[in-house]
Amino acid sequence: MGDPGTKDLLTLEDLEASGNIRSGRKHILSILVENRPGVLTRIAGLFARRGFNIDTLSVGPTDDEHLSRITITLDGATHPIDQVTKQLHKLINVLKIRDLEPSETVARELALFKIAADGTQRAEIMQICEIFRGKVVDVSKRAIIIEITGTTEKVEAFERMVRPFGLIEMMRTGEIAIARGRGET
């Protein structure tokens, strides 16, 4: 690649080699860990040292109070992901790692949207909410808070629909995912 400020054309191979292009392969890593202090920090640090950008990260308890499940979504080529998962297996508190195949996975995200809603706009926002099977969780004179649960695409589509009304604030949880069928966890 050329020096900064040059007008040299870049090829697809140059972009791929530099890491400035996404692979298109979404990875959903489901990591079963011991519920101990510092585990999340060590895992996130491992990704940071390898230069990965984590798209979403969710952590929660499992049916066993001594275990937690970390769900990480990111974009990356298969080879680097393999290297990271091998290093994750070496961490003492990591019990199991699965790179879930998106087509064989049920993934959901929760989002809360605070939207400006005066008089006539309120009815229109409520109709959009109903179309997306959202839930109104709070109403005030000038705003409405709506909860949306679904795929990342659904949450993003809802955001595009309500943004013109005046999106005051938005919070998203990040994806959680589980493999379809009766396979192991």
Image (cartoon, grey):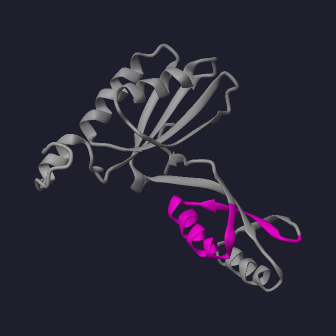
Residue 112, quarter of the rendered image = bottom right
Taking depth in this image into account, of 102 and 10 the one nearest to the observer is 10
Q: Residue 88 location in percent, x, y?
A: 41, 23
Q: Magenta stretch?
A: 141-168
Q: Residue at x 19, y 46 (%)?
A: 16
Q: Residue 66 location in percent, x, y?
A: 66, 21
- Decide if residue 88 is on the left or right side of residue 113: left
Furthest residue in direction bottom, as rendered: 120
Furthest residue in direction top, as rendered: 92
Q: Residue at x 27, y 50 (%)?
A: 21
Q: Residue 180 location in percent, x, y?
A: 49, 51
Determine if the magenta segment contains residue 131. Answer: no
Instruction: In the rendered view, tell whether residue 170 sits above or below residue 55.
Output: below
Q: Residue at x 80, y 68 (%)?
A: 143
Instruction: In the rendered view, tell whether residue 122 sits above or below residue 90.
Output: below
Instruction: In the rendered view, tell whether residue 90 sits above or below residue 101.
Output: above
Q: Residue at x 56, y 71 (%)?
A: 160
- Decide if residue 78 is on the left or right side of residue 149: left
- Decide if residue 162 is on the left or right side of residue 91: right
Q: Residue 154 location in percent, x, y?
A: 55, 66
Residue 157, quarter of the rendered image = bottom right
Count of numbered marks: 0
Determine if the magenta segment contains residue 150. Answer: yes
Furthest residue in direction front, as rendered: 5
Say which quadrant the N terminus sits in.
top left
- Decide if residue 9 is on the left or right side of residue 131: left
